[in-house]
Each structure stands twice: as structure tokens, then as C-alpha cells.
Amino acid sequence: MYQTLVTDLSNGIFTITINRPDKLNALNQQVMSDLSNVMDEVYQNKDIQSVIITGSGPKAFVAGADISEFSGASVAEGKALAKRGQDIFFKIENCPKPVIACVNGFALGGGCELAMSCHFRIASENAKFGQPEVNLGLIPGYGGTQRLVQLIGKGRAMELLMGAGMIDAATALQYGLVNYVVPQEELIAKAIAILQVINSKAPVAVAKCIEAANAVFDESKNGFEVEINAFGDCFATEDMKEGTSAFLEKRKAIFKGQ
Ligand code: COA
């Protein structure tokens, strides 16, 4: 169904694997198109409760945008590439279902940007993160200058952006770029264990958490107002009635996502 992605849906958890291992899963325009389309599937398919994004093979999550597509592009084409990439990564960031990046190796350039557009990240011990675009006479174009500052703070982000350095998984953990570091063979299992817990919660409330937390970084929105409205909207859901009743009746809530 997708030329460059392998997908699998089990127990509500949809795993998207970027599958160009011979090119370290570099994001060419076909991968970007497939990512855009697969996110439409995630939004529309009611059987998908949450999502894992990972890379194929033991070496790379994604080693960047495909550099071979850059040479010869004009200023206007460069801007269009960045706009398209940003729009696709906004689709991931604003997805109402949880999206976790399982970073199984190099997450460089567009790969680091892809991981940062996910709601949070788990890394394998061999993972490496960086924004090496200045090596190419470029800067990140898929949101990297913004999200790196948001996630690890301005000083650390500035050093990585300007120096094109790579950080290892332990440093990424220390910086707060990833939530956990685990052996590579345990990476997907760790994400599944986390998502099983999240999937047992009220789905509309989970979606509202994503919306309100994302509003912190959206200057067109007042996050506190978004929170008021999202909190209020939960009162219209059957799941809120079920959750509060179940607590008072000392039983486990059964949520329907309504
Ligand atoms: N775009 C296009 N092709 C890429 C790529 C990218 N971002 N990253 C890796 N590849 C390709 C290589 O060209 C090579 O292809 P080939 O076998 O046809 O020559 C293949 O993937 C394997 O990569 P290779 O460089 O041989 O692996 P390595 O283990 O020696 O080095 C990296 C790994 C990640 C350090 C190195 O590939 C690299 O620096 N990649 C580019 C990172 C980057 O600048 N990303 C930002 C892009 S904006």
C-alpha cells in the first residue's frame, strides 16, 4: 500500500516502519508522501488507537532528508520543500492519537526532526541524534530549529545546530530529548507497554491532552484557554461519566471513546 513504509496494526497499536534501509531510511519525497498519506489513515481509521514510528534495520531511524534530492534546487523549491515537510510533521504533532518515535539508530537532520514531531521518544542504546545541516550549507527545514529549542533549551540547541554535533542516547536522555533508553531488542516492546497503558484511558481525554499541551508552543493560541475549553468539552463525553462513576463505584472504567 505504501512504497516506502511497512505498517502493522495489532491491538490498536499501529506501527509505521520507514523502509529504505540501504539508504539509512533517508526521507526522499516518496517517503514524505507516504508519511502524509499514512497519517491520513491514522486520523481516519477508528481501529488505530495509537502509533509507533520507527526505522527499518539495526543502524538508522532516519539519517536525514535525502541529500541527493537537494542539489540544483532553487530558492523557491527550497522553501516549498520545507513548507511541505513542516506541514506533514504538523500532521504528526497534532495527531489526536498518541505517536511515539522508537529511535533505533541514527536520527539525523530530518530524522531528528521527525522524531521531535512525535509526542515523545524512546531510544535504543545505539541511537544518535543531531542536526548536521550546516555541514551541507543548510539549516533544518522541517521544524528542527523550533522543536529542538522547545525540547532541550536554547543553549544546547544552539550548540547542536551551529556545530552539527551528534549526541548519543545517554546524552539525549540527560537533555530530555528522549524519555527512555533501552537495548535495541527491547525498543518496540517498551513502546507497546507504554501505549497499552495509554490505550486503556479515555481516548477523547487523551486527544485533549495532546491538543492542550501542543498549545503551549502555538503563539496563535492561549494554552490556558485551550485547556478550559478542552476540560469543559470532556463533560460532554460518555467516557467522563463512565470514568467518574467507575471511580465512585470502586470498579474499573470501561471507555468507549465517546
Ligand atoms: N540522504 C541520502 N542518502 C543517505 C543519507 C541521506 N541523508 N544518509 C545516508 N545515505 C546513504 C549513503 O549515501 C549510502 O548510500 P550508498 O550505499 O548508495 O552509497 C547509504 O545511505 C549508507 O550510508 P553510509 O554513509 O555509507 O553509512 P555510514 O555508516 O558510513 O555513515 C552516517 C552513516 C549517518 C554518519 C552517514 O550516512 C551520514 O552522514 N549521512 C548523512 C547525514 C546528514 O547529513 N543528514 C542530514 C541531511 S539534511
Image (cartoon, rainbow, N blue to C red):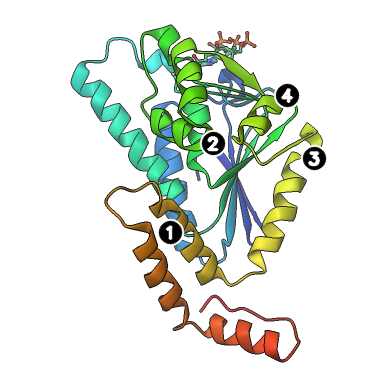
Q: Secondary structure at mark 4?
A: loop
Front disc: 2 or 1: 1
The numbered mark, 4 or 3, whose residue comes first in the sequence reads: 4
Q: Image quarter for residue 74?
A: top left
Amino acid found under the numbered disc labelled 1: Glu
Within 8 Å: ligand 1 and the Cβ of disc 4?
A: no
Q: How far apart are labels 1 and 4 at the CA level?
A: 32 Å
Q: Secondary structure at mark 3?
A: helix
Residue 17 percent coordinates (x, y): 60, 39
Front disc: 1 or 4: 1
Amino acid found under the numbered disc labelled 3: Glu
Question: Who is closer to the viewer here, 105 or 21?
Answer: 105
The numbered mark, 2 or 3, whose residue comes first in the sequence reads: 2
Q: How far apart are labels 4 and 2 at the CA level?
A: 15 Å
Q: Residues within 10 Å of mark 2 (few under 14, many from 20)?
A: many
* Badge 4 vs badge 3, beta-carbon distance below 8 Å: no
Taking the spot 30% from the left edge, 28% from the top edge, the residue there is 81
* Badge 2 vs badge 1, beta-carbon distance below 8 Å: no
In the rendered image, which residue does mark 4 sit on? 126
Q: Image quarter for residue 194?
A: bottom right
Q: Which mark is residue 115?
A: 2
Asked if residue 104 is positioned above or below residue 222 in the image, the reply reads above
Q: Image quarter for residue 129?
A: top right
Q: Which mark is residue 211?
A: 1
Q: Which mark is residue 186?
A: 3
